[in-house]
Image (tube, rainbow, N blue to C red):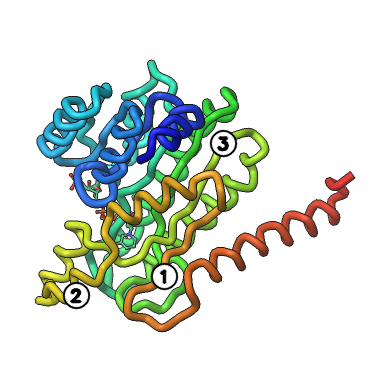
Amino acid sequence: MPNNAAENMRANYGSWAVIAGASDGTGAEYARQLAAAGINLLLVSRRLPKLDELAAGLRASHGIETRTLALDLYADDAPEKLFDAVKDVAVGLYISNAGADMEFTPVLDRSLDKLLGLIRFNIVNVTKACYYFLQPMRKRGRGGAIVMSSVSGLVGGQPGSGMYSATKAFELVLAESLWAELRGENVDVIGVAAPPMSTPAAVGVLAAAGMDKPEIVGGLYKPADVVATVLAQLGKEPCHVFDYVGVDIEPGNVTAAARHLRIKAVEDSVAKLFGLDK
Ligand SMILES: NC(=O)c1ccc[n+]([C@@H]2O[C@H](COP(=O)([O-])OP(=O)(O)OC[C@H]3O[C@@H](n4cnc5c(N)ncnc54)[C@H](OP(=O)(O)O)[C@@H]3O)[C@@H](O)[C@H]2O)c1
């Protein structure tokens, strides 16, 4: 990250960020790029040794402060534990990263427990974490949040991913709503319709299906590129939509621009309806 971009990151988002799902893939990449900007980090996931190793490397190369926390983000009390781990510092950036679903099974072929678990992971706990972290940012008049959704959240019907897509649609709309509600208060929120990426989770799914061939994995987006794009777009748009891979469909920037236009149009018409535009 160029020096002025790093300074802007610190000026806009302060000295501490929290990454939920930080031990590999895009989460670890957010950690690397934010550490390079001099931002201290709370790294959270289930595998503590991986977090500790990443944190030690970032402390050594960038001189930042780090904290690590082993936590299952499916748990009922995960958002409270997350918030508690940094209650003594001013967190200026919250990154909701973990959220993949490894099971490609139609909705009605899953147990209800599994469906409700995914709702807790990607809907209830993401909402609670955004609520906890964004309230103090709003009071301070400074901060931001990144919500990693998916291109799967743009449309239903993807085989075996119905429930996942529905939770990702929720994340995208929640982030866009928070963007609209907080943009006058110097708090930036962005929803990310992330593309197929070569994260360990995604490559693991491909490997299980015997599809982890170099020509397939090599065609996926690289986590480092996705993260650099998102950090550059934070504060500039309500959602960033990446292009699909291998699907001939509307480009991501066209989808994102249409969503942005709709947000503005709906805002204007509702304001008129309730006389809020006076
Ligand atoms: N990869 C893709 O192709 C793709 C495509 C579109 C959207 N996305 C979205 O991008 C985000 C990142 O995806 P990803 O592929 O890197 O896989 P992911 O499993 O969502 O994220 C990996 C990170 O999250 C942690 N994690 C996973 N489950 C967790 C849990 N229950 N509790 C705590 N931490 C957990 C993992 O560490 P531990 O194992 O140590 O817990 C790891 O650090 C997700 O929101 C996903 O929906 C991914």
Q: CA distance from mark 2 to mark 1?
A: 16 Å
The mark that comes first in sequence, 2 or 3, is: 3
Considering only order in the chain, which callout, 1 or 3, is on the residue closer to the N terminus?
3
Disc 1 under 8 Å from ligand 1? The reply is: no
Element carrying mark 2:
helix
Task: Give residue 128's position: percent from left, percent from top.
Answer: 45, 39
Report, in whole angstroms, how far the alpha carbon at label 2 lies from the one at label 3. Answer: 38 Å
> In which quadrant is the N terminus drawn?
top left
Q: Nearer the viewer, residue 69 or 25?
A: 25
Quadrant in which the C terminus appears: top right
Q: Hey, what amino acid is under mark 2?
A: Ile
How dense is the environment of label 2, judged by Cα within 10 Å: few (below 14), some, or many (20 and up)?
few
Q: Is residue 245 above or below residue 90?
A: below
> Label 2: which residue?
216
Q: Earlier in the sequence, mark 2 or mark 1?
A: 2
Point out which mark residue 243 bears: 1
Q: Residue furthest bottom?
A: 248
Q: Is residue 163 above or below residue 187?
A: below
> In which quarter of the view is residue 37 placed?
top left
Relative depth, front residue between 24 and 163? 24
- Inspect this view and state whether residue 120 appears: no
Please report the residue visible at 15 percent of the width from the left and 32 percent of the height from the top. Answer: 57
Q: Which residue is mark 3?
A: 187
- Callouts 2 and 1 close, C-beta under 8 Å: no
Q: Amino acid at mark 3?
A: Val
Quarter of the view holding residue 38: top left
Which residue is outermost to the front?
3
Q: Position of residue 177 (x, y in %)?
A: 59, 50
Report crowding for label 3: few under 14, some 14 to 19, many 20 or more residues within 10 A (C-alpha): many
